[in-house]
Image: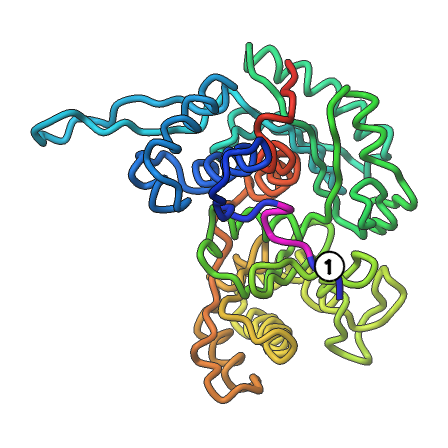
Amino acid sequence: MAEERAGSDTPRVAPARGSRNDHTRRHNLSALLTAVHYGGPLTRAQLTRDTGLNRSTIGGLVAELAELGLVIEDAAEETGAVGRPSLIVRPRTDVVALALHPDVDALELGAVAIDGSVVARRRKSVVSSPSPEEAVVFAQSAARELARDLGDARVAGVAAAVPGLVAVDGDTVVDAPHLGWRGVRLATALQEALDLPATVGNDANLGLRAEWSYGAARGVDTVVYLNGSASGIGGAALIGGRMLRGGRGYGGEFGHMMIRSDGERCSCGRAGCLETELNAERLDAAGHEASALDALAGILAAAIANLEVAFDPDLVVLGGYLGALYDERRAAIETGVRDLAFRPDAEDVAIARAALGGNRLLIGAAERAFAPLLADPAGVALRAL
């Protein structure tokens, strides 16, 4: 099974090396910027600890990253301690990535700073699923508006989080059935329209990447993620810090695991898929009716138990309307998982609601766009928005 590191090609802290050649310098710049990206603001002492580099090397690297316009170093807030205040290295918030999320009910473009914060966004509601061309035109128009908001911001690239199957080339949306897209070279279209490096990923994979980087799954490297949205249920799995993609990049379609053999027909053509048996319409129809909510909680518990058998996760993260259902029926879902789980210590499986809310997919897509910059800070040119 093909795998992708959760931080794309860039681990949270790249291991340091000792020689002084240009390759090592670039590698060390990557280690430092990656550490600040995921953990900043940080003191030089913390960077020394996290990267394994010595203090003098850290000083030179910080200076170079500051000259490149990627970090800023300033004094820490006063603590009342005697002596010189510590210097804090922070990622610059005028370095951004653009993140596009097309869905059946809306189009959204956000600008995400290199510290992981969403600094600006534009959203357009739609009455029917947008076409790829409409999504690209929206991205182009929204980018111009964001440029007015952000002034002198510099852009690393653009990435899209799409509810569908995305090829390993990071360009082609193979099939997004809820949108009606098939065989769309979306990254190519975005690159031509925005004149920026572009890439595309599955929305669930990118949602998990965001939660792993900054949210509920931070510090946990074996995670299963389930998200319920207007486009159905998406899923992803992180095993040992690596995203499982499948042989052709289509793994993690947990919304299409069979829950009932005699269930309703799904958009995929099968019957009884999780996203037909547990969707937003059914949850809305249940309202506050206890028996209806208990039935839906039982379906979710069965799905989590099935994923527990397959992946043995340390954490299950629930987003969207699945997170809302978990909040409503937490005890019932946790009891159901324990009763149905295969492993003898199933009570140790933690379940959590996704922490990043409506920013999750924008942050996850931005992680993809930032990956080349994090891997080679001195070799990637930033562009004006």
Residue occupying image coordinates x 68% and y 55%: 4
Q: In front here: 106 or 25? A: 25
Question: How far across and down, in percent of the image, does residue 308 sit?
Answer: 59, 76
Quadrant for the N terminus, please. bottom right
Q: Is the magenta stretch mostly helix, strand or loop?
A: loop
Disc 1 on helix, strand or loop? loop
Q: Position of residue 330 (x, y in %)?
A: 46, 69
Please, what is the three-letter code of the amino acid marked with disc 1? Answer: Arg
Magenta highlight range: 4-9
Q: Which residue is nearer to you in this view: 245 or 162?
A: 245
**Residue found farthest to the right:** 183
Looking at the image, residue 156 sits to the left or right of residue 216; the answer is right
Q: Is residue 356 left or right of residue 173?
A: left
Examine the structure image and report whether residue 235 is included in the region drawn in magenta: no
Q: Is residue 347 above or below residue 144?
A: below
Q: Nearer the viewer, residue 341 or 24?
A: 24
Residue 219 shows in the view: yes
**Image quarter in which the C terminus is found:** top right
| Up-down relation of residue 188 to residue 338 (above or below) | above
Q: Which colour scheme is used?
A: rainbow
Using the rendered image of the protein, determine whether residue 295 is visible from the camera's viewpoint. Answer: no
Compared to 167, does 115 lie above or below?
A: above
Find disc 1 in the rendering and name its residue: 245
